[in-house]
Amino acid sequence: MASGLIWVCRGSTPRRNESDALSGPVETRRLRAGSADVGSRLDAWIARRLDLSRTRVQKLLEAERIRARVGAEAWFTPRKSDLVGVDWEVEVVVPPAAPVDLVAQDLPVSIVYEDADLAVVDKAAGMVVHPAPGHRDGTLVNALLHHLTDLSGVGGRLRPGIVHRLDKDTSGLLVVAKSDRAHLGLAAALKARRIKRLYVAASWGHLAETPTTIDRPIGRDPRDRKRMGVVEGGRRAITHVRVREDWRAAQLLDVALQTGRTHQIRVHLASIGHPVVGDSVYGAGREKGMSGAALGWARTLAQRVPRQFLHAARLVFDHPVSGASLAFEAPLPADLAVAAEWARRGGASGSE
């Protein structure tokens, strides 16, 4: 039996209460342990396999929404500290997200292209793509509900029209589906890697080789569930990197995604010792490890970059309905463009 096999069913759950029925369908996920999983602590194993926080899994255990059995034996309610055993099968009932009323908000958003089926937007840094805990409104979705007449419903009630995402502090191009037909076509193209996404990033230090490909699995960091990391058993992730400009203690890069994992570019560049400039999560304080003239230059650049230096600059795909080839480009926004210009001028002299 393959390790960590997961399958999903709906409507067949060990426990269900009235509040579940009011808030939407309950999703039941089943996992079967393989030899590599034996001895893992239960809550950590479930969190890793289902991409949930460990705290979330523990709350599900407390609510008796998780049960286990060995082979054909009777189901039992496990404890969070139990160790996964041979032939364990685990069933996890995941309640739906708490209801959120989406409201249209007249927020500024740059729409670079629109037709009856889709739109392409240039997202500003600082804007969350869709509502989530801690960000109930003020998102790109709230803005799109105001500016567009239609959004597809395939992505669910909290993510209408959203086919792919950008981090809050990453700027640049996103394609948004207005019709369900377009959404399904775009999602299939994304899965088949037929949508090309090119980013511009600045990273600390200098790559030993260019171009280079980073092929390392990404998953939740077992030490901090709010972060991602290169982890054994994570999902395969591939990033292609080429140097565009050499600066004194950093480089401007063209980065192409072959896969699309959470924080992929930031995690991959950090994993090879060249984190994104301005990345407070995966590259905080990286410039402090430099010495000599490079140290002062790097500190100044860090002060001039107001957020992670990462921008989705180019998007190429075939229209999911008409089949027409579409290509869009978005120049660096002012905050990053100004920092890049300083790096170019100051890279040789170290002037500020």
Image (cartoon, helix red, strand yellow):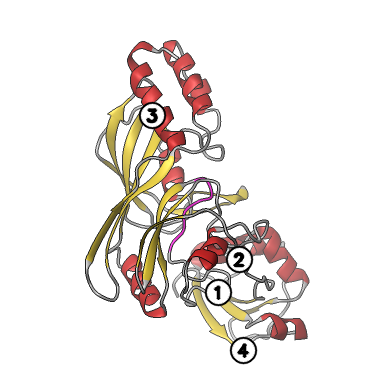
- Measure how far apart labels 1 and 2 are at the Cα level: 8 Å
Which residue has dot 3 on it? 340
The three-letter code of the residue at mark 3 reads Ala
Camera-nearest label, 3 or 2: 3
Residue under label 1: 31
Local crowd size for mark 4, using a 10 Å CA cut-off: few (<14), some (14–19), many (≥20): few
Q: Can you tell which mark lies on residue 146? A: none
Q: CA distance from mark 3 to mark 2?
A: 43 Å
Q: Secondary structure at mark 4?
A: loop
Instruction: Point out the tag, 1 or 4, that comes first from the N-terminus.
Output: 4
Tell which circle, 4 or 2, labels the residue nearer the N-terminal end.
Answer: 4
Residue 183 seen in the current view: yes
- The Cα atoms of the two marked residues, 1 and 4, are separated by 15 Å
Return the x and y of residue 138 as percentages of the image width and height. 61, 57
| Residue beneath the point at 60% across and 79% down | 27
Residue 12, numbered label? 4
- Nearest the viewer among 86 and 212 is 212
Amino acid type indicated by mark 4 = Ser
How far across and how far down the image is residue 342, in percent? 40, 23
Element under disc 2: helix
Choose mark 4 or mark 2, whichever is in front.
4
Task: Name the mark on residue 46.
Answer: 2
Q: CA distance from mark 3 to mark 1?
A: 48 Å
136 displayed left or right of 196: right
Disc 4 versus disc 2: distance between alpha carbons?
Answer: 19 Å
Question: Could you tell me which quadrant the N terminus lies in?
Answer: bottom left
**Residues marked 1 and 2 touching at CB (< 8 Å):** yes
Residue 33 located within the stretch drawn in magenta: no
Give 350 or 84, whichever is nearer the viewer.
350
